[in-house]
Amino acid sequence: MLVLTRRPGESIVVGENIVVTVIEIKGGQVRIGIDAPREAEVYREEIYEQVKQENLTAIANVDEIRKAVQGDGD
Amino acid sequence: MGYPTSPNCTIRLWGMTDETGTESREHKGVLEKALRFPEGLPGLPDLENFVIVELREDGAFQQLQSLDNTDVSMIVCVPWLFFPDYAPVLSDIEQAELELESADDAVLFVPVSFDRESRQMFLNLLGPFVVNSKTRIGRQLVLTGTDYTTRTKIELPGT
């Protein structure tokens, strides 16, 4: 992983057209601004990860869930 | 039993197949009714082609079955069965990507999940599937910037 040190107001450029700017550092949190083209989708990693994990859980338990939803008869 | 049936509560907008649909006689029909997720799903990027299998006569739950890996499927349902106020918003990018010209063309359903220890069932309201019913192309959204979660508890009627 590339590790860079930035101060508030300073930026990092990723690829041709994505600019990540450190806006503010306060109380252990960093506010980050992202300029990216419309087609580049930006997610908080943990949010995307949650959906991914829940898909895998849903798939792993598909037989249980199918039984439960069919349980009260058709 | 006991599921509401308002117009919002149906996803019978595309052809469905029943569980006998995998018989060779029906196979062509299954493929014709397939949905395509060009980007795959989060966690399953290689699975693009799916079919919806109806699980109940009342249409409350469906199985989203992968055609690329027949071992992979998940149960889905229309979220408004349980959460009438659910109101996901598609970004301009998502609408453009799905070539959605009208909200009427969008069909939405969400994954059903389950916790083995507590035996609790959940809807994943953070990651709904949206399909353009005209093109049958869809994707799973990640509703960033909302309070929706992947584990919103549901109780099935009669359980």
Image (spheres, rainbow, N blue to C red):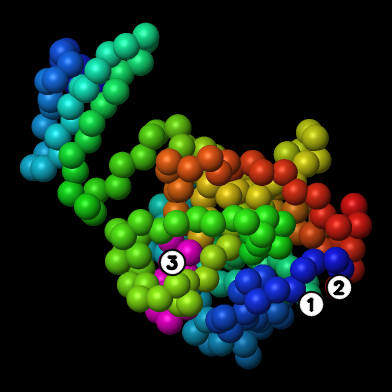
Q: Chain of mark 2?
A: A
Q: Which quadrant of the figure has residue B58?
A: bottom right
Question: Is residue B65 on the magenta stretch?
Answer: no
- Mark 2: few/some/many CA within 10 Å (<14, 14-19, 20+): few
Q: Tell whether label 2 touches label 1 (CB within 8 Å).
A: yes
Q: Chain of mark 3?
A: B
User: Image point 31% across, 42% down: which residue?
Assistant: A42
Look at mark 1 in the image and give the residue it sits on.
B57
User: Image point 55% across, 44% down: which residue?
Assistant: B148
Spatial CA distance of label 1 from label 2 is 6 Å
**Residues in magenta, as a range:** B130-139
Where is residue B153? Give x, y as percent: 72, 44
- Mark 3: few/some/many CA within 10 Å (<14, 14-19, 20+): many
Q: Is residue A26 above or below residue B66?
A: above
Q: Is residue B74 visible?
A: no
Q: Is residue A3 visible?
A: yes
